Image: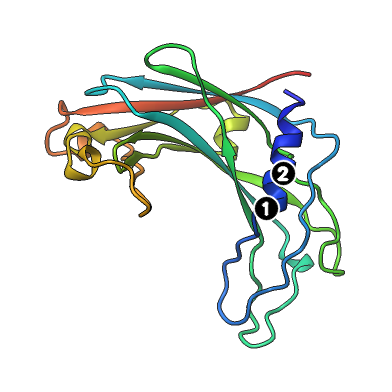
Amino acid sequence: MKRLIPALAVLLAITTITTIACGQAMKKPDIKLNPHPKMRYEITLTIENAPGPFDAVEGSLDYQVQNDRCVPLQPVSGAKPTPSKHLPLAFTRISDKVYKGEFYADLLQDEDYFGLGICRWSLTFASAYLNVGNWKFGPFISLEDILASKPVTRYFNNESYFSEEAKSKRSDNPPATDDGRTHRSDFKEPKNTFSTTLVGREKFQ
């Protein structure tokens, strides 16, 4: 699993930080990887009753600074942007309906990036993307549920699998993403649905 770190270091070097704010852009810090991450987790994706195969199953990790005192105010708006980082999560196929991925919840290094004190990073969400054509089914799970090993199930309409977007080839335009619903009963035709379940567990070193 340690080989995960060099690959992500390259991604961090070529990607940029995103901010949630108005006004002028905040100076982009050189976000560093934690040289000694310890919070290693495995996430399992289980797909039930899907109407067909998927072109690919991918994932992502969303990290965010939790303490805004370390972030400077924007000079024009006075807002405090929230530094965040979006990184890929690789899933390995175990069977037709089970996929697994591994990651570190403490992958990013806590550091004084702006001269205002230590910025403390935390994983916020892990997401899976079930791709078909130019459509994505995108279930997600929060850090809180990962730490508690709590399964999170999302439901999706089978009709989306057969939509025009799903039938079309991947294009340069970002595919539409459906993050599903919490209850099967939310759909007019509950039987015409499939489900995904994400659950995390700690992977001891």
Q: Residue at x 63, y 31 (%)?
A: 147
User: Up-down: is 55 above or below 124?
Assistant: above
Q: Secondary structure at mark 2?
A: helix
Q: CA distance from mark 1 to mark 2?
A: 7 Å
The quarter of the picture where the N terminus appears is top right
Give the image location of residue 25, x and y in percent.
64, 76
User: Up-down: is 131 above or below 51?
Assistant: below
- Which residue type carries mark 1? Ile
Q: Which mark is residue 10?
A: 2
Q: Residue at x 82, y 62 (%)?
A: 113
Q: What residue does disc 1 label?
A: 14
Q: Residue at x 29, y 38 (%)?
A: 133
Residue 8 appears in view: yes
The quarter of the picture where the C terminus appears is top right
Residue 38 lies left or right of residue 176; in this view the side is: right
Residue 151 appears in view: no
Residue 140 lies left or right of residue 167; in this view the side is: right
Q: Quarter of the image holding residue 70?
A: bottom right
Residue reaching furthest bottom? 76
Pick the front one: 9 or 48: 9
User: Up-down: is 127 above or below 84?
Assistant: above
Q: Quarter of the image holding residue 157?
A: top left
- Which residue type carries mark 2? Val
User: Up-down: is 28 above or below 150?
Assistant: below
Residue reaching furthest left? 189
Tell me how many marks there are.
2
Give the image location of residue 138, x and y in percent.
39, 39
Pick the front one: 173 or 104: 173
| Marks 1 and 2 in Cβ contact (< 8 Å) | yes
Residue 62 lies left or right of residue 180; in this view the side is: right
Give the image location of residue 175, x and y in percent.
34, 48
